[in-house]
């Protein structure tokens, strides 16, 4: 298993304590309910991420060398996965964001192997967009 910061390790421990995929699924769904949605006026085609099975609207900005994310989806399970991804990147420097292997993190959570290939590709697209949003600023 890779080396993770305290917040990432806490997420891994939380999911390690869940006994079944159904428990993990319910936890992901609960996380999705806690993810703040974006205003309907921001749900425009230009903000949609390509490569996602569901609709995913993506906004990122950098202030004081910190990446701020606003991501939403029309699918409940994707909203939960987005919440996990945002939590995993939370507090990382821009350089650490580009270096962080979020896909491995999701594997270590025991989630990636339960996603359909198209859902997995969508999650990879979200991770790639987050990393891309951090790159121009650190060059």
Image (spheres, rainbow, N blue to C red):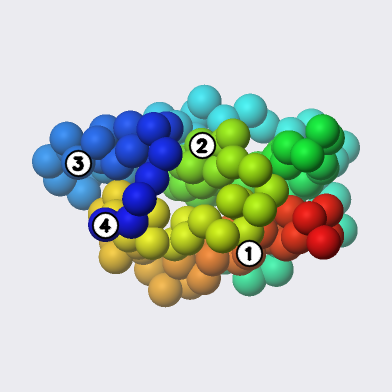
Whether residues under marks 4 and 2 lie with C-beta atoms below 8 angstroms apart, the answer is: no
Q: Quadrant of the N terminus?
A: bottom left
Which residue is rendered at x = 65% and y = 43% of the image? 93
Which residue is rendered at x = 39% and y = 32% of the image? 6
Q: Secondary structure at mark 1?
A: helix
x, y (%) of residue 94? 69, 48
Q: Which residue is mark 2?
A: 87
x, y (%) of residue 105? 39, 54
* CA–CA distance in space, label 4 to label 2: 18 Å
Which residue is rendered at x = 57% and y = 36% of the image? 90
Q: Residues within 10 Å of mark 1 (few under 14, many from 20)?
A: few
Viewer-nearest of labels 3 and 4? Answer: 4
x, y (%) of residue 8? 40, 39
Q: Which residue is mark 4?
A: 1
* CA–CA distance in space, label 2 to label 1: 16 Å
- Residue found at the very far left of the displayed protein: 19
* CA–CA distance in space, label 3 to label 2: 17 Å
Q: Earlier in the sequence, mark 1 or mark 4?
A: 4
Viewer-nearest of labels 4 and 2? Answer: 4
Q: Is residue 46 left or right of residue 4?
A: right
Q: Earlier in the sequence, mark 3 or mark 4?
A: 4
Q: Which residue is mark 1?
A: 128
Viewer-nearest of labels 1 and 4? Answer: 4
The quadrant in which residue 112 appears is bottom left
Q: Give residue 16's mark.
A: 3
Q: Earlier in the sequence, mark 3 or mark 2?
A: 3
């Amino acid at each position: 298993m890779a080396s993770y910061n305290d917040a990432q390790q806490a997420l891994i421990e939380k999911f390690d304590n869940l006994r079944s995929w159904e428990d993990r699924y319910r936890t992901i769904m609960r996380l999705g309910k806690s993810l703040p949605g974006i205003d309907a006026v921001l749900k425009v085609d230009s903000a949609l991420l390509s490569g996602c099975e569901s609709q995913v609207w993506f906004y990122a900005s950098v202030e004081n060398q910190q990446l701020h994310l606003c991501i939403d989806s029309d699918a409940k399970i994707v909203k939960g996965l987005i919440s996990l991804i945002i939590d995993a990147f939370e507090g990382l420097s821009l350089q650490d964001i580009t270096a962080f292997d979020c896909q491995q993190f999701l594997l270590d959570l025991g989630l990636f192997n339960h996603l359909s290939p198209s859902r997995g590709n969508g999650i990879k697209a979200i991770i790639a967009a987050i990393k891309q949003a951090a790159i121009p600023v650190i060059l």
